[in-house]
Image (spheres, rainbow, N blue to C red):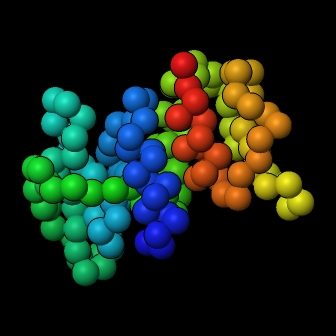
Amino acid sequence: MTDEQTALARRAVACKGWRWMPGAATDSKFARIVATDAEGAPCAAEEGASEDDCYAVWLDGVPVLPDLTDPATLGCLLALVREAWGDPFLCPAADRETGWWLDGYAAVDYLQSYRSEAEALVAALEGAP
């Protein structure tokens, strides 16, 4: 991950509405969360040299960040944003000229645009009530 992606992932996990969800990818290549502990911290993942060669790994106490370039992880983040805002219709939208923003009925800042879908979702989770 780039420094910018790492910083964005750190912002995401610092949000009060953040929690790991099964299927979310970590910053470790080919690792997906399969279980969390009672506090919501990731405790098990599948990892391997390729997607076809995976094995279970225990993550107790191992710091990991979400891979916000992964489509499934973005879906998990979207679910957290919708939950935090109480708006099941909230969705990311984009314009080639102005960038990404969130569209829905929640009180998100529709006038603010972001460089990426992930950045828009993280900002929405940060600003959630």
| Residue located 86% across and 61% down the image | 96
Residue 70 shows in this picture = no
- Count of numbered circles on the image: 0
Asked if residue 83 lies left or right of residue 120, the reply is left
Residue 77, image x, y percentages:
49, 43
- Rendered view: 111 above or below 60: above
**What residue sits 52% from the left and 65% below the top?**
4
Question: Image quadrant for the C terminus?
Answer: top right
Depth order, front residue of 11/89: 11
What residue is shown at x 43% (from left), y 35% (from top)?
15
Q: Position of residue 53 (x, y in %)?
A: 23, 76
Q: Residue 38's quadrant in the figure?
A: top left
Q: Position of residue 66 (x, y in %)?
A: 38, 55
Identify the residue at image location x=34%, y=56%: 65
Q: Position of residue 122 (x, y in %)?
A: 55, 44
> Is residue 119 found left or right of 8 in the rendered image?
right
Between 18 and 52, which is closer to the camera in this rendering? 18
